[in-house]
Image (spheres, helix red, strand yellow):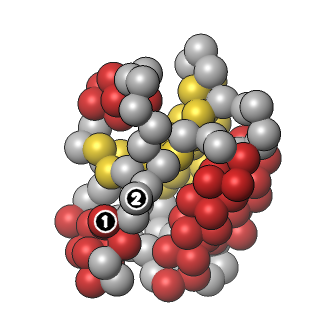
Amino acid sequence: MKVQVRNLDKISILDSSGDVDLYSSPRLREALLAEIQPGGPSVLVNMSGVAYIDSSGIATLVEGLQLSRQTKTRFGLFGLRPNARSVLELARLHKVFAIFENEAEALEKIGSVQPFSGI
C-alpha cells in the first residue's frame, strides 16, 4: 500500500493505493494521524486506488473519523471502488462517513458551509 499526501489550500488529500489490510493499514493510520490536527486542514482520503479493504483498514478509517470529530476537522472519503464500498455498506458505515463519488465533488462539498464529518 502507498499513501501520498497532496495539499490544496487548507485541504489534505491522502491518495491511497493498494490493499488496506492488517499489514498495510498502519501506513494509512500514520498518514491520517499526521494530517488530522486541531486547526489543521480538512482531510479527504482518495480510495480510488484501493481494491481491497479488510476490518483493520475499516478500523483505521473509523479512528480517523473519530479523531476528526475530536479536532473539529472535516473528513471524508471519495472514489470508493465497489468492493470497498460494499464493505462499508455491510458494516453500515456508509451512513457515518461523508462519502463522495470523486475528487471534484469532495472538494466542492468540503468548501461548503455545512460540516460533513458524519452524522
Q: Mark 1 vs mark 2: give the one in front.
A: 2
Please report the residue visible at 57 percent of the width from the left and 19 percent of the height from the top.
Answer: 8
| Labelled disc at residue 14 | none
Find numbered disc 1 in the image and state the secondary structure of the residue it sits on: helix
Q: Please name the amino acid that badge 2 sits on.
A: Ile
- Whether residue 43 sits left or right of residue 88 in the image: it is right
Pointer 2 residue: 119
Of the 4 image quadrants, the one containing the N terminus is bottom right
Kindly identify the residue that appears in the image at 70 percent across and 55 percent down.
70
* Mark 1 Cα-neighbour bin, 10 Å: few <14, some 14–19, many ≥20: few
Q: Is residue 15 visible?
A: no
Residue kind at label 1, given as amino acid type: Lys
Q: Is residue 74 above or below residue 91?
A: above
Q: How many marks?
A: 2
Where in the figure is residue 117, as x and y percent of width and height? 48, 49
Figure quadrant of residue 52: bottom left
Place of residue 17 in the rendered image (x, y in percent of width and height, measured from the top left):
48, 54
Residue found farthest to the top: 9
1 and 2 marks in contact (CB < 8 Å): yes
**Vertically, is 39 above or below 93?**
above
> Horizontally, is 111 left or right of 80 in the view?
right
Taking the spot 63% from the left edge, 41% from the top edge, the residue there is 73
Q: Gap in Å between the C-alphas at discs 1 and 2?
A: 7 Å
Q: Position of residue 54 (x, y in %)?
A: 46, 82
Q: Which secondary structure lies at badge 2? A: loop
Mark seen at residue 95: 1
